[in-house]
Image (tube, rainbow, N blue to C red):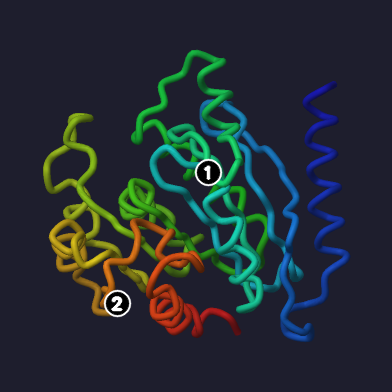
Amino acid sequence: MKKLLSVFVVSFLIGSVFCSCESVKNAEPKKVETPVTVTFPSQDGLPVTADLYMAYGNDAPLILLCHRANWSRGEYLEIAPKLNLLGFNAIAIDQRSGKTKNNVDNATKLAAESAGKETTYLDAVQDIQSAIDYASKLSKKKIILWGSSYSSSLGFVLVKSNADKIAAYLAFSPGEYFADLGKPADWIATEAKDVKLPVFVTSRPSERKDAQPIFDAIENKDKTYFVPETESKHGSQALYEATEGNAASWNAVEAFLSRFSK
């Protein structure tokens, strides 16, 4: 009974958000300052917590935002509203491999620890997959996947098997982060090779040695690699207002996303 009530409440909240928003085609740019927090089950039943930034109706494009190591969905408190102003809805999730960012605790990590589940980078794959499935139900269009640090690498593993749900992929500071977890040293580059959808990769200049081999491995010609002139910051933090050179990074992101905002 409690589970059915939870599903009803979440469905009501999502429905309320959609009903109160105009179609993006007919609305002035707007943003969500305070997101609606929801949960949905991961593939193993663990509750995944997410923040919904649904500024428009379900005919608007939607971006699924995944955080970096030791962080949470709080990574996107500043970024998601700006994506709203570009014409996108957004959903920021907590993967079970993480901790806290911007005073937002990673609720999925806490639930995993309480349940005695492993919380390595690889254990988070099922959370991102479930989020892809969940987010796809919130938009009439294919979603856009966005990863930061370790999640930006895992995205290359997931986009190939979700081509029917994902329109494009943005990877902030990808790298081969999984050797200690038993994966080959070139695992992500190998996975990236066969990605067919549009890809945007960005990293700090000092991270180019990690990201360039992954970018070069992508055989699809519809790809962009942006490296800012300043040292910037790791992952999606490159877009924070406090990060030097953030405007250039935003310009590159906007240029890539512009074709999907219609």
Where 85 falls versus 166 (above or below)? below
Query: Residue at (63%, 45%) from the top-left corner?
Result: 50
Q: Horizontally, is 208 left or right of 104 in the view?
A: left
Q: Of helix, strand and loop, which one carries label 1?
A: strand
In the rendered image, residue 175, in percent from the top left (x then y), is placed at 23, 52
Query: Residue at (49%, 34%) from the top-left corner?
Result: 99
Question: Which quarter of the image is occupied by the C terminus?
Answer: bottom right
- Inspect the image, locate mark 1, and give the three-letter code of the amino acid beneath it: Lys
Query: Residue at (56%, 35%) from the top-left corner?
Result: 106
- Inspect the image, locate mark 2, and give the three-letter code of the amino acid beneath it: Thr
In the rendered image, residue 227, in percent from the top left (x then y), is placed at 26, 73
Where 182 falls versus 188 (above or below)? above
Q: Horizontally, is 88 left or right of 252 in the view?
A: right
In the rendered image, residue 28, in percent from the top left (x then y), is placed at 77, 84
Depth check, front residue: 37 or 6: 37
Residue annotated with mark 1 = 101
Question: Which quarter of the image is occupied by the N terminus?
Answer: top right
Distance between the alpha carbons at the discs numbered 2 and 1: 28 Å
Kindly identify which numbered label has been placed on residue 224: 2
Total marks in image:
2
Where 224 falls versus 154 (above or below)? below
Q: Horizontally, is 9 left or right of 109 in the view?
A: right
